[in-house]
């Protein structure tokens, strides 16, 4: 409402309070200009109309919103609110949703209400320990530290150095190995093969999704974003330049994680054949449903025609069902297929090429994603045993590594 009027009987029957809306403050609360008017009701209404018109036609007359003050009274909640207004728009919806959950569940009603200037490293670390004692896991406490640490650092900057960041030098509590979550591991070749078979038996579309994830190491969101136009059937490549992320009300298409994530990935003939079969099935489904098939539709869409991308979390939930059907260990996740791809590439290509195929921004990630595979480790043990026994040059040549390319035998010693 632009204006309001009410009688002030405490000032006399002919006294009226006129209020005119003039904008909102930095927290979104309405601001009003209030004056007292003496006279009849109709005269008061005319005066209110004049004030509203004057306000609306004179933008310069609208008071500027007060600048947010950053100083000794600033709380952690206020710092997070400032960061939300001036920074969260640059983050992915998934990241924002995670920050909001941490804020609401662990920060707002506890340490969030405290003044930053009144906190020190001791108080912050005690807060982390209380979270741990209350059942919060290591990753949860780490994320809490990220949220309040970033907010306090920004508040210190915005205060012009008046505030300091009490989170900067803090340390997290330690968790025994038994309380730490199991790391994502690279599954064995037999496990991946079992997953692919189980997924194909469950559903052709999801079977192709799991096969592509294992064959390329794509991130879950990247595979969900693949369109038919991203596939080069002649060169046997797939272009990765988008990602699907969970957001309020569904999923959205966004640019991938980093510039390095934009890449073209080669695939084998078997993978292409599976995708060709899936495309034929999707075309037939569109015809049955009497909807046009979108040539640039999403490959793994559940919608006839392919107009909508699959939701990443739905793919993860389906993977769990398939994993149980296949009898695969619970520590194998959909993301484990990315670790599998990174691991089996080791004997084939150098780390720089591996970095490009996986879409990593740094080569350091190559070491993070590489796990040992039991069958390969057994081959190493057998090789070392032969070396120690002095029989390394005797007997049959060991079978090649998983995916290892073996040079063709030469017809003569000179042909190598």
Image: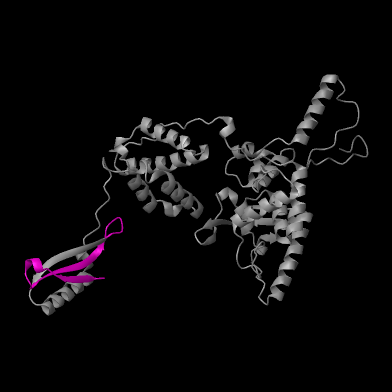
Q: Is residue 209 something that shows in the picture?
A: yes
Provide the residue span drawn in magenta: 1-29
Left or right, 2 with reference to 208? left
Left or right, 271 with reference to 133? right
Residue 308 is situated, as x and y percent measured from the top left of the image, at 60, 66
Q: Nearer the viewer, residue 278 or 410?
A: 278
Residue 21 is situated, as x and y percent measured from the top left of the image, at 23, 66
Q: Residue at 66% of width from left, 51% of height from top?
A: 320
The C terminus sits in image quarter: top right
Q: Relative to residue 389, is residue 25 depicted above or below?
A: below
Left or right, 49 with reference to 355? left
Figure colour scheme: one colour
Q: Residue at 36% of width from left, 50% of height from top?
A: 81
Residue 5 is situated, as x and y percent measured from the top left of the image, at 17, 71
Instruction: Looking at this view, name the residue that lies furthest to the right.
Output: 411
Q: Nearer the viewer, residue 335 or 295?
A: 335
Q: Residue at 79% of width from left, 27% of height from top?
A: 381
Q: Residue at 79% of width from left, 55% of height from top?
A: 270
Q: Nearer the viewer, residue 391 or 119?
A: 119
> Does the magenta portion include 8?
yes
The quadrant in which residue 52 appears is bottom left
Residue 226 is situated, as x and y percent measured from the top left of the image, at 64, 59
Q: Relative to residue 156, is residue 291 depicted above or below?
A: below
């Amino acid at each position: 409402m632009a204006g309001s009027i009410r009688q002030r009987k405490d000032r006399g029957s002919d006294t009226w309070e006129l209020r005119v809306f003039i904008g909102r403050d930095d927290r979104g609360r309405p601001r009003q200009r209030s004056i007292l008017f003496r006279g009849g009701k109709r005269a008061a209404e005319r005066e209110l109309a004049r004030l509203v018109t004057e306000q609306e036609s004179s933008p310069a007359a609208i008071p500027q919103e007060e600048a947010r003050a950053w100083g000794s009274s600033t709380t952690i909640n206020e710092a997070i609110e400032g960061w939300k207004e001036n920074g969260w728009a640059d983050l992915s919806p998934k990241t924002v949703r995670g920050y909001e959950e941490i804020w609401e569940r662990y920060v707002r009603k506890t340490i969030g209400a405290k003044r930053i200037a009144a906190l020190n490293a001791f108080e912050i670390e005690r807060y982390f320990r209380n979270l741990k004692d209350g059942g919060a896991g290591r990753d949860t406490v780490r994320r809490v530290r990220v949220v309040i640490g970033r907010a306090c650092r920004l508040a210190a900057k915005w205060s012009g150095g008046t505030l300091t960041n009490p989170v900067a030098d803090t340390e997290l509590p330690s968790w025994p190995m038994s309380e730490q979550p199991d790391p994502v591991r690279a599954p064995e070749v037999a496990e991946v093969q079992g997953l692919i078979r189980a997924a194909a038996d469950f559903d052709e579309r999801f079977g192709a999704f799991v096969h592509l994830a294992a064959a390329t190491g794509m991130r879950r969101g990247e595979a969900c974003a693949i369109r038919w136009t991203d596939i080069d059937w002649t060169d046997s490549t797939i272009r990765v330049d988008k990602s699907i992320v969970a957001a309020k009300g569904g999923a959205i298409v966004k640019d991938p994680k980093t510039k390095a994530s934009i890449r073209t990935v080669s695939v084998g003939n078997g993978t292409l054949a599976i995708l060709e079969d899936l495309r034929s099935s999707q075309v037939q489904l569109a015809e049955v449903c009497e909807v046009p098939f979108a040539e640039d539709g999403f490959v793994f869409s559940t919608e006839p025609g392919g107009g909508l991308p699959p939701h990443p979390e739905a793919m993860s939930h389906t993977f769990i069902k398939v994993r149980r059907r296949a009898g695969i260990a619970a520590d194998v996740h959909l993301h484990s297929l990315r670790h599998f791809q990174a691991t089996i590439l080791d004997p084939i290509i150098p780390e720089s090429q591996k970095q490009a195929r996986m879409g990593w921004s740094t080569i350091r990630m190559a070491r993070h994603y590489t796990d040992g595979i039991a069958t390969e480790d057994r081959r190493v043990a057998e090789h070392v045993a032969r070396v120690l026994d002095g029989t390394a040059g005797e007997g049959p040549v060991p079978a090649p590594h998983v995916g290892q390319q073996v040079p063709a035998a030469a017809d003569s010693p000179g042909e190598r």
